[in-house]
Every structure is written in C-alpha cells, then in structure tokens.
C-alpha cells in the first residue's frame, strides 16, 4: 500500500517531531556598522531598522544583542578619513580597532569578527590598491597583512577577508601565525559574487566604487563550478570557515560547498535580500515575519551552518518566544 505522506503533517505536534531543519539563534552573526564620530545613531534609509552607531552609543545595540542570546557579531567601520590605500584600516587607533577593544572589554561573551577589506576606507571605493584603474592583487595583499595584524593586536576573535583577492587567506594566515596569533580564525568570503543585491550595503558603509564595478575580482553570477575552485583554494590556504555571498540567489552554491567540504559553511543574507523583504512587508504585500523566517530556514536547509543576517535580532525574538 502506498505511504500516506500527509499523515506526518496533520498536527503541529507531529510536524515539529519530523521537521528536518531547525533554525537556532546560535546560527546567526549580526552585522554592525560603526562610524567614527560622536553621538551617532543614524538609520540607514535603504535598510529600515539598521543603524550606523558611533562607538559612544554602540552599547545601546550590543545590550540588546546580548540579551537576545546572539553570540557573534561582524564589524564594518566607517572612518572619518579616507585615502587611496585605505590606510585607516590598519591604524591602531582606527575605528574598528577601537571598537574591537571596547567590545572585548565590555562584552567578553561575544565572538567578535572583523571584516577585512578596503572599500570603506579608500577614497575610490574599490577593495584594494589601484593600478591602471583596476585593483592590483599583490599590492593589496601587502596592505591586507597590515590590516589584519592591527585587528589581531586589538583582540579580534575572527577575521573575514571579503575582497576576493587571490591568496588572501594564505597571506593572512601567515601574518597571524608569525606574530603569535595562531588561534585567530579565518572565515573566508570564499565564494563572493559580483551581485546587484549589495546596493543598500554601499549606503550603509559609504563603500560604493567611484567608477566602474568589481567584476574583475568578484565572481560572475553565471558560474557554479568556479565556486568549488575558489572554496578549495581557501581550504588549501588555511581557512576555518567557508562563506557564500549572497545567500538567497545562491542556495545551490551553498549546497555544493556543503556536499564537497568538511569545514563549516557560512552564508551572508545580504542587504538587498533584507531590504526587499522589508519593502514588501511595509507595503503589506507579504507577511514580513513569515517570509523572513522562511528565507532564513531556506538558507539553513541549503546547508549553511552559519548565517550572517540583518534579521538576526528579529528572528531571535521569534525563536526565543517559541522556546518559552
């Protein structure tokens, strides 16, 4: 006799017992934008509910993050001064270095991750040193070493190189190890596509390129097999975690990495994915909370162990309530 598959769906109690994928607050990393200056709490217009904070007001956000049980944050800095090389990124008194020290001192339970890139720090908005209107890979690696060492000295727990430079993980691992920071983890932006979903982030971090785009260093959205090569390179170079970015339009890539590698897989539920749900919800076109949770569940089901998401606080409130 054929199996009656609906039998396992007839009540919530039964559905809960046979559910294959479960979201947990522990899966989330919450991004924070920290702006150099004083008394700043500025909502990002294209990302409703997300703010840029100055360091003197960041505790307002961190208190809530900790109270909700979110254990991990990733930091993005907006400096006052920018130059061609992004030298503020390795200034020991730069905004991210000061933020790391503040957070580790006042919120020791938090895992602090620092983005390692230059687009927020350069006056041209590209992710490294320019030569002939293109990012020079190897010159950028020299500066990546400086940036990651400054973050390590400040006390960061994990670094996340996001510029898609060849050999970035290798250079960072070498710089950390030779300076006695062997225990700092590396989460590679292993498979980062040149995506139009990043638009609101560029408002958040003042990181839009002043000319051209990032297609010479970020991946072509048409390519799937290349993702395995990029991820394998990060594995070989010493990455501890592999990331796919964006998440929602690249669920197949998340599953490919999950099937091919033994390392934890992270996915970045990026700004455009967040803002589309918010916009549709604000217009009454969708049930925002249900779509948010379905989106995050789909990313987890695809194979992500870790989800970087601007929805972390809202989703944590729902998950915590469900556990009560």
Image (cartoon, grey):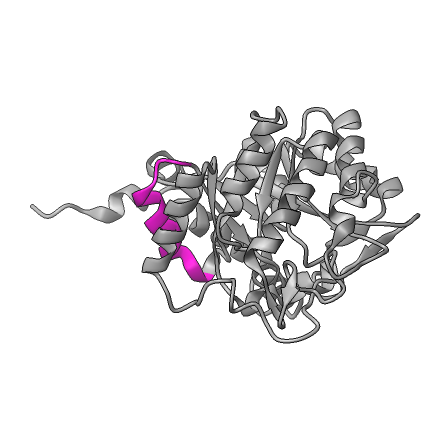
Answer left or right for 87 relative to 173: right
Instruction: Specify whether residue 257 is painted magenta.
Output: yes
Q: In the depicted view, which residue is nearer to us: 25 or 171?
A: 171
Q: In the depicted view, which residue is nearer to us: 71 or 277?
A: 71
Residue 175 percent across, percent down from the top left: 59, 35
Q: Is residue 26 above or below residue 38?
A: above
- Kindly identify the residue that appears in the image at 77 percent across and 41 percent down: 61
Q: Is residue 89 above or below residue 182?
A: below
Query: Can residue 248 be seen here?
Result: yes
Residue 212 percent across, percent down from the top left: 62, 75
Residue closest to the far right:
38
Report the magenta residues as a range.
Answer: 249-263
Residue 36 percent across, percent down from the top left: 85, 49
Q: Is residue 138 above or below residue 307?
A: below
**Residue 47 is drawn in which quadrant?**
bottom right
Q: In the depicted view, which residue is nearer to us: 257 or 211?
A: 211
Answer left or right for 215 relative to 252: right
Q: Main secondary structure of the magenta part?
A: helix
Quarter of the picture containing the N terminus is top left
Residue closest to the far left:
1
Query: Can residue 74 be seen here?
Result: no
Residue closest to the far bottom:
212
Answer left or right for 17 relative to 248: left
Quarter of the picture containing the C terminus is top right
- Kindly identify the residue that appears in the image at 18 percent across and 47 percent down: 4
- Kindly identify the residue that appears in the image at 74 percent across and 48 percent down: 89
Instruction: Specify whether residue 258 is painted magenta.
Output: yes
């Amino acid at each position: 006799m054929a199996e009656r598959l609906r039998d396992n769906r007839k009540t919530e109690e039964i559905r809960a017992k046979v559910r294959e994928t479960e979201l947990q607050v522990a899966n989330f990393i919450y991004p924070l934008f920290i702006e150099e200056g004083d008394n700043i709490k500025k909502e990002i217009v294209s990302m409703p509910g997300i703010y840029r904070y100055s360091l003197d007001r960041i505790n307002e956000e961190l208190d809530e993050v900790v109270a909700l049980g979110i254990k991990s944050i990733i930091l993005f800095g907006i400096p006052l001064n920018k130059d061609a090389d992004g030298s503020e990124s390795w200034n020991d008194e730069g905004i991210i270095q000061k933020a790391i020290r503040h957070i580790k001192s006042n919120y020791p339970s938090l895992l602090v991750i620092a983005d390692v890139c230059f687009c927020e720090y350069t006056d041209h908005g590209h992710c490294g040193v320019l030569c002939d209107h293109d990012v020079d890979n190897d010159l950028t690696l020299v500066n990546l070493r400086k940036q990651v060492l400054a973050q390590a000295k400040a006390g960061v727990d994990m670094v996340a190189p996001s510029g898609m430079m060849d050999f970035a993980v290798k250079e960072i691992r070498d710089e950390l190890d030779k300076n006695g920071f062997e225990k700092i983890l590396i989460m590679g932006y292993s498979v980062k596509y040149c995506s139009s979903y990043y638009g609101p982030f560029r408002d958040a971090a003042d990181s839009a390129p002043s000319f051209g785009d990032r297609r010479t260093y970020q991946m072509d959205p048409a390519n799937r097999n290349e993702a395995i090569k990029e991820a394998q390179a990060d594995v070989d170079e010493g990455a501890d975690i592999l990331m796919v970015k964006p998440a929602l339009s690249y669920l197949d890539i998340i599953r490919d990495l999950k099937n091919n590698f033994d390392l934890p897989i992270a996915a970045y539920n990026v700004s455009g994915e967040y803002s589309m749900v918010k916009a549709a919800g604000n217009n009454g076109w969708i049930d925002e909370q249900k779509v948010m949770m379905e989106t995050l569940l789909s990313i987890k089901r695809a194979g992500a162990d870790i989800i970087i998401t601007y929805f972390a606080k809202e989703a944590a409130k729902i998950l915590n309530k469900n556990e009560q």
